[in-house]
Image (spheres, helix red, strand yellow):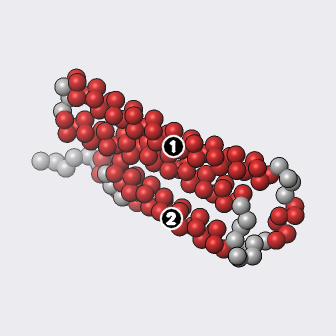
Amino acid sequence: MEPALSPARQAVKPDWFDPLLHVLATVFEGAGVLVITVGTLSALVLFALRLHRGDDRSDAFRRLRTGLARGILLGLELLVAADIIGTVAVRATVENLTTLALIVLIRTFLSFALEVEIDGRWPWRKAEVERRREAPAPPR
């Protein structure tokens, strides 16, 4: 068993602090799962409505993927917050912080991949894409 990183830290926290953090972490986890679930269901319902209206199938599918990605992305943000709060609530050991770092790294990578999926470009190319969009067309 590893020693806590800051033993003095435990002495200055009020008794209600750790239970509160556990409750907050659980609330954030539930909110994250709820957002992913509602986002998925709404994306599927909108996809079905678009197909029923006779919209282009490839456009409807692209919008489905974008809707799914947005719901998952927002849910992941809440789950990362829950992980951080949950780690603060337990003893701050090197093992716990390493686990948190790995979870945040994985979820950040997933978020990054979903953002690329939604926007269709790398985040650092945003300004370049917007400049091209605003530039006047070359003369013919």
Q: Where residue 9 is drawn, which disc sits there?
A: none
Q: Where residue 33 is drawn, which disc sits there?
A: 1
Where is 40 relative to 90, above or below? above
Bin the neighbour count of mark 1 within 10 Å (Cα to Cα): few under 14, some 14-19, many 20 and up: some
The single residue placed furthest to the bottom in the displayed view is: 2
Judged left or right of residue 1, residue 82 is: left
Asked if marks 1 and 2 touch (Cβ < 8 Å), the reply is no
- What x and y, as percent, mark residue 8? 85, 69
Report the residue at 48% width, 59% height from top.
108
The kind of residue tagged 2 is Leu
Q: Can you see residue 29? A: yes
Q: Nearer the viewer, residue 137 or 1?
A: 1
The secondary element bearing badge 2 is classed as: helix
- What x and y, as percent, mark residue 68? 37, 42
Judged left or right of residue 118, residue 21 is: right
Report the residue at 73% width, 65% height from top.
91
The single residue placed furthest to the top in the displayed view is: 53
Q: Can you see residue 129? A: no
- What x and y, as percent, mark residue 60? 25, 35
The kind of residue tagged 1 is Val
Q: Which residue is mark 2?
A: 105
Report the residue at 38% width, 46% height from top.
69
> Where the N terminus falls, by quadrant?
bottom right
Judged left or right of residue 77, residue 20 is: right
Question: Which callout, 1 or 2, points at the residue further toward the start of the chain?
Answer: 1
State which quadrant residue 94 falls in.
bottom right
Bin the neighbour count of mark 2 within 10 Å (Cα to Cα): few under 14, some 14-19, many 20 and up: few
Q: CA distance from mark 1 to mark 2?
A: 19 Å
